[in-house]
Image (tube, helix red, strand yellow):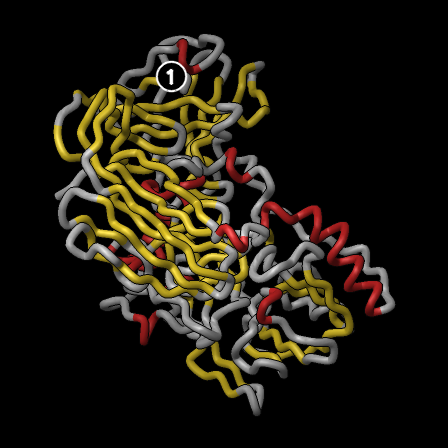
Amino acid sequence: MSIRLKGGRGPSLVPPSLSRINGGIGYDFVKTYVSGGSASTQSVKDSNRLVYDGAVWFRDGQIIAEGVGAVTLQNLNPEIGTLDFEGRVTRVTEGIMRVIVRSAVGVFKLEIDLRNKSDSTESSVFLSTLNGTLNSHLTDSAEAKIASINGTPSMAVNGKVYTTQNHTSKVYTRNPDLWISQSGAVDLTSISPWNSSGGVTKAGVLISRRHLANSAHFDYGIGTIVRLVNMAGVAFDYTVVGKARHPDYKPYYPDLTVYTLDRDVDASLTPCLVIPANYESFIDVDWTMYTLPASLGLDQEEKALIATFFQGALFIRPSSANQLTFYEAKIGGDSGNPAFLIVNGKLVLVTCWTQGGVGSGTPIYRFISDINTIMIPSADAQAGVSTGYTVTEADFSAWPNLTTQNYLLGDDGLGNKSAWVNTGTTENSKPVYHKLEAAGKGWKLSSNGSVWATSDLGSPDTGHPAQTSAGNEATPDLATFGTWSFTTP
């Protein structure tokens, strides 16, 4: 069994004759351990890692296409490494593997170095997500939902948003066995299952009470009827009266179109949140290939698919066997469907699909200002209205901020680490810390005036044994507990 080391982004290429395009091809890899080095276990940002000082490794990874449309791959050196249709590379022997990538915007030539490497710098092996971080929440909540399914999870029973979709008679029955509806329901009413332009294709997602978004390369026109369905299965139809592509759009980036509807949507429909511009302060983007945060993506059949969120708007195939049950490659006609993180039971929009395979698109977080100040006003102007609406960014501030390091590392004495966030509030003139498990749930650490003590926060799914310190030092990292200890990151 291989050990995966910290890697990074390989070369990102565009054809010389098409250097104007907003995209390219890259090789995202992990450093797969071969031999050597000395290791120590450390908690770094949102993961627990085995940190090596010097090792022999090679680059094992996946070809990623961004902003270039549909691609086909030709492996010129199968004796060096194998390549599947999603771009996953598996080394056969040491050497240089050459790949031709044909896309809608040109031909790319990619050289992938699969030779052994060694260096004296530190490399890290992912062990687990750090409990109490946003990253841990994303994956743990998905795993908990799948584990709550009665019987053996399957795509046929647990992967479809609806058990009945009759677009002609407008009959929609939501699937009570849907994996995402287990262990706490999630409001899915921002997801459009049908429109009069593409039928079940082209898709669309509600981003305000009067605006939808999808992909510019597969958008619909003025007069299109778009359907949304509330959680009770009641369908509502709206007409597109204004439309704005991103002003810098060239095939296939920034691949975004925003639409103004003829009226505000019904109160039973909930616009999604969007991933905040500062999300990289809460998820270690250099490590998302390894820490494996789960995401939700839709397709033209309204299946609730899982992929591993990598960074920006890139995804990779899940490594979890449970999550792989609900993984499928994206195909033609899936473009425009949304992909989300699920944070505290709410949908947080990451992108709308552009690429097939694992799936990728335009990262919403880079264009929040453009959506709010250019695209929505432009679509409104075409509709002859001024709604004043903007998208709502998800608030990640309750989770550990990996940039400001507003948290302490807790150790239960058995080697289990967790992150405890300084809430910015005080009790008895001392800071209050939370270790979150979900919105408003988890552990609390505060001073009662005499000692530091833990208590349940909200109504956690499982109660926690109380921990108290011997004294009432200024902060918990200066205090002595019976079994627990706290340190700064």
Where does label 1 land, which residue?
Answer: 487
> Quadrant where the C terminus lies?
top left
Q: Where residue 466 appears, x then y in whole percent?
A: 35, 27
Camera-side residue of 83 and 152:
83
User: Vertical placement of 318 versus 189: above or below?
Assistant: above
Find residue 323 and report its image quarter.
bottom left
Secondary structure category for the residue under label 1: strand
Neighbor class of circle 1 (other Cα within 10 Å; few <14, some 14-19, many 20+) is some
> Quadrant where the N terminus lies?
top left
Asked if residue 483 lies left or right of residue 178, the reply is left
Find residue 4 and report its image quarter.
top left
Asked if residue 381 lies left or right of residue 274, the reply is right
Q: Let me know if residue 315 appears in the view.
A: yes
User: Vertical placement of 489 versus 220: above or below?
Assistant: above
Q: Residue at x 60, y 45 (%)?
A: 366
Kindly identify the amino acid type of the residue bearing the numbered disc 1.
Answer: Thr
Asked if residue 282 lies left or right of residue 97, the reply is right
Q: Where residue 400 appears, x then y in whole percent?
A: 48, 31
Q: Residue at x 68, y 53 (%)?
A: 391
Q: Residue at x 58, y 37 (%)?
A: 278
Q: Let me know if residue 127 appears in the view.
A: no
